Amino acid sequence: MSKSHGRKSRRHHLTRRAPPGAPPGTLIADPEAAPSHVRVMSYGPHELREKEAEEPSSLPGYLEKWPVTWVNVTGLGDLKTVRQIGESFGLHMLALEDVVNVHQRSKVEHYGTYDFIVSRAARRSERLETGQVSLFLGKNFVITFLEQEEPLLEPVRERLRKGSAQVRSGGPDYLAYAILDALLDSYFPLLEDLGERLELLEDEVVLRPGPAVVARIHEAKRDLLTIRRAVWPQRDALGILYRDPSTLVAAETRLFLRDCYDHTVQIVDLIETYREMASGMMDVYLSSVSNRMNEVMKVLTIIATIFIPLSFIASLYGMNFNTEASRWNMPELGWRYGYLFALGVMALMAGGMLLYFRRKGWLGAQAAAPPSDSEPMD
Amino acid sequence: MSKSHGRKSRRHHLTRRAPPGAPPGTLIADPEAAPSHVRVMSYGPHELREKEAEEPSSLPGYLEKWPVTWVNVTGLGDLKTVRQIGESFGLHMLALEDVVNVHQRSKVEHYGTYDFIVSRAARRSERLETGQVSLFLGKNFVITFLEQEEPLLEPVRERLRKGSAQVRSGGPDYLAYAILDALLDSYFPLLEDLGERLELLEDEVVLRPGPAVVARIHEAKRDLLTIRRAVWPQRDALGILYRDPSTLVAAETRLFLRDCYDHTVQIVDLIETYREMASGMMDVYLSSVSNRMNEVMKVLTIIATIFIPLSFIASLYGMNFNTEASRWNMPELGWRYGYLFALGVMALMAGGMLLYFRRKGWLGAQAAAPPSDSEPMD
Amino acid sequence: MSKSHGRKSRRHHLTRRAPPGAPPGTLIADPEAAPSHVRVMSYGPHELREKEAEEPSSLPGYLEKWPVTWVNVTGLGDLKTVRQIGESFGLHMLALEDVVNVHQRSKVEHYGTYDFIVSRAARRSERLETGQVSLFLGKNFVITFLEQEEPLLEPVRERLRKGSAQVRSGGPDYLAYAILDALLDSYFPLLEDLGERLELLEDEVVLRPGPAVVARIHEAKRDLLTIRRAVWPQRDALGILYRDPSTLVAAETRLFLRDCYDHTVQIVDLIETYREMASGMMDVYLSSVSNRMNEVMKVLTIIATIFIPLSFIASLYGMNFNTEASRWNMPELGWRYGYLFALGVMALMAGGMLLYFRRKGWLGAQAAAPPSDSEPMD
Amino acid sequence: MSKSHGRKSRRHHLTRRAPPGAPPGTLIADPEAAPSHVRVMSYGPHELREKEAEEPSSLPGYLEKWPVTWVNVTGLGDLKTVRQIGESFGLHMLALEDVVNVHQRSKVEHYGTYDFIVSRAARRSERLETGQVSLFLGKNFVITFLEQEEPLLEPVRERLRKGSAQVRSGGPDYLAYAILDALLDSYFPLLEDLGERLELLEDEVVLRPGPAVVARIHEAKRDLLTIRRAVWPQRDALGILYRDPSTLVAAETRLFLRDCYDHTVQIVDLIETYREMASGMMDVYLSSVSNRMNEVMKVLTIIATIFIPLSFIASLYGMNFNTEASRWNMPELGWRYGYLFALGVMALMAGGMLLYFRRKGWLGAQAAAPPSDSEPMD
Amino acid sequence: MSKSHGRKSRRHHLTRRAPPGAPPGTLIADPEAAPSHVRVMSYGPHELREKEAEEPSSLPGYLEKWPVTWVNVTGLGDLKTVRQIGESFGLHMLALEDVVNVHQRSKVEHYGTYDFIVSRAARRSERLETGQVSLFLGKNFVITFLEQEEPLLEPVRERLRKGSAQVRSGGPDYLAYAILDALLDSYFPLLEDLGERLELLEDEVVLRPGPAVVARIHEAKRDLLTIRRAVWPQRDALGILYRDPSTLVAAETRLFLRDCYDHTVQIVDLIETYREMASGMMDVYLSSVSNRMNEVMKVLTIIATIFIPLSFIASLYGMNFNTEASRWNMPELGWRYGYLFALGVMALMAGGMLLYFRRKGWLGAQAAAPPSDSEPMD
């Protein structure tokens, strides 16, 4: 059951667009989306007001009274709310469509009087996933749309409430930065975890090469792919944001966005390193497996090629030709030293084989000192 | 038979240009092309007229009377019709050659007073294929040439008929956008299907690695290649279209084209992810196969190396040396405990071998607990 | 013998430059080059004159009398002719060196009053090869140098003779386009052929994997490489030619060159697709081979591991211990049901092995239903 | 124990950022960081003063008196010191955060009146690691923050003390160059060592292919990866520094920075070469292993296929059918030349097999001349 | 001994910089470098003077008297000479450091009144190597520093002596071009040789796959890598030189430099083709080896699976159960047709196996017609 759920939740990554041919800007609610909940924080350098569960219709009133208003919508199941907010703030219907259709790549789009920013935050439920956070940055407002409650934003609110000078007097551009930076923080513990998993695997692949290790390497690669898919466009988006001479972002905030951009560069860099590590591991794994196969084959070959000829000699003298019927029939059987002669032939053959194997260098590797030699690999 | 058809229809992807050395603009009808059928829709903000099966000669009359005229030609078998439309609207012969030769990459070409846009829509007949849609965008007209009836365009027509303000007053550039966006919608269900196939394969490759799985991975890769070949240039073409300061596209429409461009970026991104998934699967497959081979070899080696020496001993005492002819001839046969001695030697040899295998770690993996151990893989 | 010839003709691809240290512009005739043959066509909108086997010295006379003069030199064995033409038209010695040294990459070089264009046409002799066509485009002339007679240019001459308005009044730039386009046509039948070969191989690699298939895939890859080496720089050269604001190319001709450029883009695109197909085939081949190996090994293992222990038991009771010498010596031989007991032990061992193999899933794959199962692969 | 330490120290590479959601510029000391130690050198063309263990509060005094002041902080455990220096010189809190969080990529950031440069120096402790050196370059000061004492900087100090004209009158930009160049010197001995290891491995992989060689190739690749991760961004940073028209860097110093940039290009170039060497080695290794496996299999096959049929014949005549019970029961046993006949059949079979193997070309490779033939590989 | 020498000479490729921390511009002579030898050629359109073994101190005198002076220093063991020339011509110490440290990548550096150009020429001693040629191009001089006597430059001198108009009146920029072009000529014979080696290997890899072939492919790849490392940056350097609007290079000379640049593009193009050929060969090799392994395994399996059961039957009837002790003990031994019955059972088993193998398609490939079938591979 959990499996089918996992599959379902991933398929969503793909599309859930409006039905083919629908006009642009058609909003389609995800039937599994949580109900919408609107929370407003408005503040200036000296004051802050916070209201849970505000009505969308009363939002425009805030803009006149407060330097900065942050409207946060959690849960995208209630299309009416989304549409109402879109109308109140004059948001483009294409942007709203992207808000509801939560499988966008990270991006920054300029719409004249406001910027539309899509970011993705990582979370680990059954498997590693990323959730979409849509952000509108206007002259005196920030609107965020979240698929579900995002604990990473709570510290941002806390800093606003505590009212440090910087965060309160920073304008909506600084608030947008603070939110984007907080979301980016979701990737670091995951990468730390991935790094540890890869280091463990690096030992395992030598000590216990097997399908379980391969499956875990494969899983790590898939997680890296998921993070890369989310962070790579985020890097580009942040690069655009901090370089673009838009009037919505103050020069001072640009420094902070550059720092944020720097973090995405670091993540991408780390992901590439991890990917190379994982690829290198597969090489080690394959060579380790082929080496073991080789060793197995050598043991088989040595045993078989020594004993098969010996067995043949033994079978030979096990034949029942009637020695009495003719003196040509296996006279060796009646020799005084017939048995010893046969044993001697066998010993010579075995010795010859061993000499041949030694020359080939097959014995040195594992027959001579099996336990000690195999230790570095086992 | 169906096979040869499939091969034939694919070979077309390649060329069917005019014979080598023909002058440029030579139109050659594909002998399998459907007969042409001309349908006209002309409209303004308040009115719309639709006519099936119009004569090409009467088309110029529309341009004077209506703000926007959409001429749709389905089937490219009737070169006279194509040529007549080309002359009526002053289309360049090189563009018309590309209209008839339906294996163009997506592109946008500026011809002064009109733009020539080639797009490709996916369809799944026997295998995944893409069909060409050629579109001319003029000051007050849109002309589309289709290889065959395209159901994806019906919703666009329906929206025109219903007459929503946006679509009716949007001009030919908006109409062109609506058509291109509708064609792009053909890729999403196919990608969703591919995503599901790949997820199934991801399980299969571990549970039932075999040539059937490889064939299906290969097929998925080929489908991805087909989609990529179609969408990659489409992305570039749309990027050109929404950025180019051509007077044919209004600023408002640019936003919609950017959204459309964004969809192609998403598709390309998804394709790359799927390609990496498919490559990773081949790795898992190969390691899974080599692991099974290894296991098979180990079983063979263990059985053979234990029993071959034992059999040798048994053969030895099966020899018929005449014990009566000499006391050196196999005196063991007459010993009181000769048989038990032989059995003891065999038991010692088998035990030594088992000990050696245990030290090598060959037994732990599958001999000790074969059913439970092999479960994660089987 | 044919082999050594093939090798020789390919080595030429590499160099045959002037001896190291020779001054630039040193012309060295290829000892195998055909004797030179000069053919002149001069024309205006209303008239055309054609002369076979003209003397190089009389060429400048044409330029004064005719709007366009096309000098075509076939065979580069006669350096005096090349040098004379170079002097008559004021061509740079570096360009002439490239004309004679027929292993240039496609390129466009501006020399003030004329452009020097190198193009390559494909031909299939023993193996796929490309031949160099050097073209000088001046204000009122086109000069082409060919290694050998090129049948692709005959249709261009025919169109000039028939005197369609476009081709006759088009100027030397249009003529240059017509020649370049005709040469490009040489690639399409080869690619069509390659596409068919690859589709056949795609079936073969599954049905009859073997070294012959690999050799043919390898050959197809080499042909693709040869075409790519020729067309890739041709694409860049045509891109430069149609975008460069040189006064030698009229605006109208640019449209035609863009079309020609578009064809090279298509060819390159197709080559990349074919290369991915060929790479995918190698993957399928390798997995197919390793799968067959696996199957072979399983059959061997099953047979050997079942019968080796049985044979051991049989050998055991074939030993000749003297049952009369001691009651400990193989008393089973004298038991009433000794033989049946031995057979029973064997049956039990075989049954246990089969059960083990069934649990491992080794039997289901090919022992149970060998003909039907192996069909999808055979 | 040493293992867990190695793992721990590498995990650090990843993150240790401030806790998620902390405001930007939050300084968190690494609990393992060394205590801070401040050392000041201030100099002009004719004079130099050096002070160990200066108080951070007295630093601003230097700026007024001396043309150039170099503040060097070793050990980042004392956040108060870092913060005080930051305030004294007006350093941005984001830069200070990067100083303390020692896992930054190399970079150059312009902060108006000063540049912030991050560089990494290599050191080999247990495994190859890189340590961060943060450098602030102002109009009349250079501040460096080091994780631990860096012996590479001592020669720079020595040159300052000796007071060569260039280094003393060069300004802070020249000092910054001298420091960056000295740090870059840490990579050259490591690369020289890597080059030697790879050359040794190149021989070993042919002479003694085995898991130990693979492990060492893998290790070399990991070291290359570590160096590349450090130097690649350093190259970009130096490229920015020497090209940027910042007023902080004099034209003369640019030449030196270009030289420094050139060294990073050389290192990156060398790393790529080494990586290709390492990849090529893995190919040689795999083909060497598969070749050995092949040889092992051939020996087994030749021995087994020759003796298995012979043994069968021998077993045949070892059957105990009662020749007296019927004249159809193994009459050969009583033939006069029965034994010789059996031996003859065996000889014929063995000869036929050998002939078959010779035709297949299996014997030439190792059975005919085993010691001499195997030498090139052994 | 020769081996250790080869290793030593390659290690040099890496570094031999000044000791870590040395001031920039520190000249360190390679202890193995040849003693320096200065040769001067100075010339104008009508006159030329040549002097062997000139004193560095007298060089400035030439500049006043002659339009062009070419100072050639062979051997870099005499640092005093290098330093003196550097002072006489005002060369930057960083450039001189690069002159002495002969492991630079090709590059062009502008130093105001002169350009510093590093180029590399190939030579084959024990293995393929490249040597550095440093060139300073000034308003009226060219200075070249060579590691050892370079025979490629002799023809350039010869052309100067003969005094063709172009070379004598061409200025120092033309002389620099002539030198660079002559050095580039060193690569063509090596590439021709490599091409021939690869073509031979292409046949060998099919006819005689083995470790010797792999070693030679690997060697070819290493040589390609060496050439690529030298030519790739040379291409960039020449590209910079012919495009840069430096006043040191006349417009006419730019055409020649473009031609030279073109040659590097050709070399790089050829190297890439060769690299793809070499990679393709490894694929063919691996599939060839795995195919042979497969064939070996099939022979073993067929022989073993046919004879092992037969031998079991034979062993069965070789058991010594006492037929007289009980009528259940191997009554077959006493049957009238017991022997024929046993032979019949064996024939049936062998026949069944052969039928099974035929169905599997294992026999067609090599058992039915071994010599003819194996010919395409052998």
Image (cartoon, coloured by chain):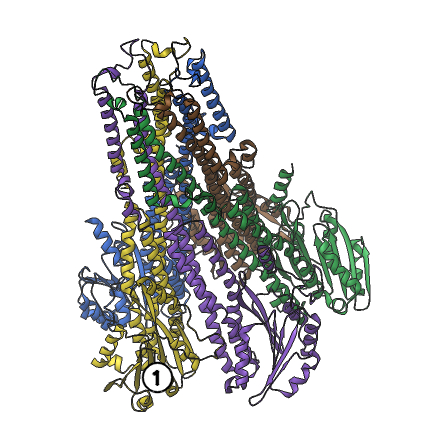
Chain colours: A purple, B green, C brown, D yellow, E blue
Q: Quadrant of residue D120?
A: bottom left
Q: Is residue A309 visible from the viewing direction of this image?
A: no
Residue B10: give x, y in percent of width and height. Answer: 61, 44
Q: Nearer the viewer, residue B270 or C8?
A: B270
Q: Nearer the viewer, residue B189 or B161?
A: B189
As displayed, is residue A91 above or below residue B318? below
As displayed, is residue C331 above or below residue E257? above
As displayed, is residue B355 above or below residue A35? above
Q: Is residue C124 visible from the viewing direction of this image?
A: yes
Residue B277: give x, y in percent of width and height. Answer: 52, 54
Q: Nearer the viewer, residue A166 or B128?
A: A166
Amino acid tagged 1 = Thr
Tell me: A190 left or right of E62. right
Residue A3: give x, y in percent of width and height. Answer: 57, 55
Q: Residues within 10 Å of mark 1 (few under 14, many from 20)?
A: some
Q: Quadrant of residue E118?
A: bottom left
Residue D101: give x, y in percent of width and height. Answer: 39, 74
Question: Considering the numbered disc 1 on the image, is that residue within a helix, a strand or a loop?
Answer: helix
Tell me: D261 left or right of B134. left
Give the chain letter at badge 1. Answer: D
Q: Determine the residue positioned at 27% across, 32% down.
A: A353
Tell me: D312 left or right of E351. left
Tell me: C148 left or right of D57. right
Look at the image and tell me in which quarter the C terminus of chain E lies.
top left
Q: Determine the residue positioned at 62% across, 62% down.
A: B263
What residue sits right under mark 1 in the picture?
D81
